[in-house]
Image: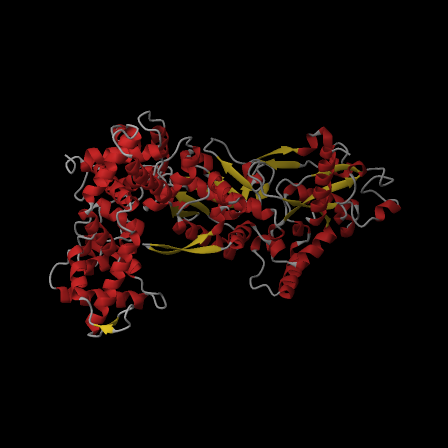
Amino acid sequence: MSETAATIRSIAESLGERFKKGRRVLSFSEYLDLFESDPVRHSRDASRYIRDCFDHYGTTEVEQPWGTFTRWNLFDLPWEGQEDAMRRGALIGQEHVQEEIYRAISNFAREGRANRLVLLHGPNGSAKSTIVGCIMRGAEHYSHLDEGALYRFNWVFPSTKTLRGSLGFGQTSAGAAAASYAHLADDEIDAKLLVEVRDHPLFLIPVDERRKVLEKTFAASGAKDGPSEWILRGQLSHKSQQVFEALLASYQGDYAEVLKHVQVERFFISQRYRVGAVTIGPQLSVDAAERQVTMDRSLASLPASLQAVTLYEAKGELIDAAGGILEFSDLLKRPLDAFKYLQLSIETGEVQLTAQNVQLNCVMMGSANELHLDAFREHPEFASFRGRLELLRTPYLRSYVQEQAIYDTHVVPQIRRHVAPHATTVAAQFAVLTRMRKPNTDNLGRAVSNALSGLTAVEKMALYAKGQAPERLDADAQKVLRASVREIYEESNAHPVYEGRIGASPREMRVVLFDAAQSTRYACLSPLAVLEEIEDLCERKSEFEWLQIDSQAGGYHDVKAFGEALFAHLLATWEEELYASSGLVDEQQYDDLFERYVQHVSVWVKKERIRNKVTGEYEEPDPSMMSEVERLLEVQGEADEWRKQLISNIAAWAIDRPGSKVQAQIVFPHLLKRLREAVFADKRTEVARIARDIAILEREEGFGLDAHRKEQLGRVLTALRGKFGYCDACAADMVSTLMRRRYHELLS
């Protein structure tokens, strides 16, 4: 046997084993045994199924400056593997929206069915479709697991080879004594009727008897919640009911004979094949229809008792979504008449067709942008729709850290050149700055209002991203601001033009990054190229609403000021990275010096002595060292008061975080930064020389530099690569720009 043939055989054996293990085809009695083993799992309606799908993948607590939130792991697509998940569209951020969706679905589960449409509304590009897409992918994967097994049933009719005589009339041969026709081979079956609406197998049990079965099995299993209304009161679809009644009449009321024709089949949710996961675009049509089955010649072999019955088969998106999720993409782009039927369908749980009412069993979700929703709110019919809609706001992200993660995961992998450090950071910061809204302090407390006074758009961006309060504020104001981030973050929620509604879309910034990557001026995707493309974008005022808003005090909506601020911040960051890579000072020395300073201040405040680690003797705290550090920190006012306040801040931090080790680097990152900047100021001329010589090394092949200097510069470039991700080309761009904008006067 060839290697290929052996591989095919191995695959065939594996698939066969998985088919049997997965219990893909069952008789009705076999399904009842499966149901009794776990009645809760095998009687879920769509809302309980989706809720359990959320629960199956678990949650993670996410801490943001504006609060702690629950993130459902489903939105990370964990079954895909990290790289594939990012490529396929895992959701970044939006934990608040995740919580609201789970709350809504949990309410549906408690109420017995999904009796409202979950409508995600927000600006274009705010991840509404991504959210629904993740839920669909989660349901698809979950349905392939034992915990997420789903079953439907079909009707099968044996051939005359299996049964002598006509099916459903009179006495049959001994062959008909089989317990079920579910496992007959294809050549032993004359006809098979698929139940396209995916009726639950338990619907074959009459409602009164079904209730007793469910109550008994649920009690035996110790289930906390009772069965849903859908499984308690649901009935067979029109076609299944007609088949059931025709067979029951043919068998003279023998229910057991009717059940022989039931073939229970496992099905799997699939977006590709539109099974339990369907997206409807804003087309102008009703989303369900029907056709007459008995006009199909392929079903001419049905028993005579059924050929005399007019059978209709439902079709369309509402039917395909049965058991799962139905998404109405851009719902409000449709004329009202195109979705008005949903009002009654959601209320009754049924959709009316010409010859039948089809029971709905799916979670309906939709998306809409704010402009269409605003127009819909003004429509006379909105009040009647409002009770059937679960409106969930989905704004743009307001943390540039999260925004950058979008670009790093969805854009960077598609760029075929090196991506320089800070290229995506600059894009993310600009996008978030355009979304910042000047705070309205009227509804905030006096302390918060005072702290917010004069807060610029750039400062607000830093506050949201990392909880950083402006250093220009005093310690008390900074503390108030950090403690009030959530209050500030939610301040505009009640306003029609809420923060995060207007601003640059990730889609627009994606184009900016791709255009910047094609720049011929830089070998890499440079942050300088990104800033140039942003400047070009801002010239197209007539195309974007966020460019038409008048600028306000504090730099809000001032796109020109944004560009200048981002460029200045980029230069400062480049200086820090070049300094850190220069080898002029060991970075650990800052931490050690500040840690030593805090220790000496602590014993000074307590009027104690400190143990010398070298001699082992107890000594007075070093006043000269403390004074030198305070000089570098530019401490204002009395040193005594400053030192006492420092220790009080440490104590307050420890009280807020019991059990956490007090580390100066964590408690006072702003002071460490200030200390680093002070030391750097003394060595700025040396750093400028390094920048000049790197530019000569890279752009002029090191002309005039001796071998020892080239070796020193090589170590700096190695550090830039290892610590920060530069290549030689973007390092040359960095130092050349620093020479023009920061260092030309130092070396002139």
**Quarter of the figure that contains the N terminus:** top right
- Locate residue 71 relative to residue 197 in the image: left or right: left
x then y, percent, for residue 276: 57, 42
Where does residue 108 sit, x and y in percent of width and height? 49, 53
**Horizontal and vertical percent for residue 103?**
44, 54
Q: Quadrant of residue 706?
A: top left
Quadrant hosting residue 267: top right
Where 52 falls versus 369 (above or below)?
below
Image: 282 above or below 257: above
**Of residues 270 and 717, the one drawn nearer to the viewer in this rendering:** 717
Residue at horizontal 74 percent and vertical 41 percent from the top: 156
Work out which residue is located at the far left of the displayed protein and give it: 637
Whether residue 35 is visible to the viewer of this picture, yes or no, is yes
| Residue under the image location 68 percent in, 39 percent down | 194
Coloured how? secondary structure
Residue 688's image quarter? Answer: top left
The quarter of the image holding the C terminus is top left
Image position of 136 (left or right of 336): right
- Out of 624 and 377, give the one closest to the viewer: 624
Task: Look at the picture and state if 215 lies above or below 340.
Answer: below
Q: Is residue 555 visible?
A: no
How far across and down, in percent of the image, does residue 461 sit? 27, 46
Q: Residue at x 49, y 39 (%)?
A: 88
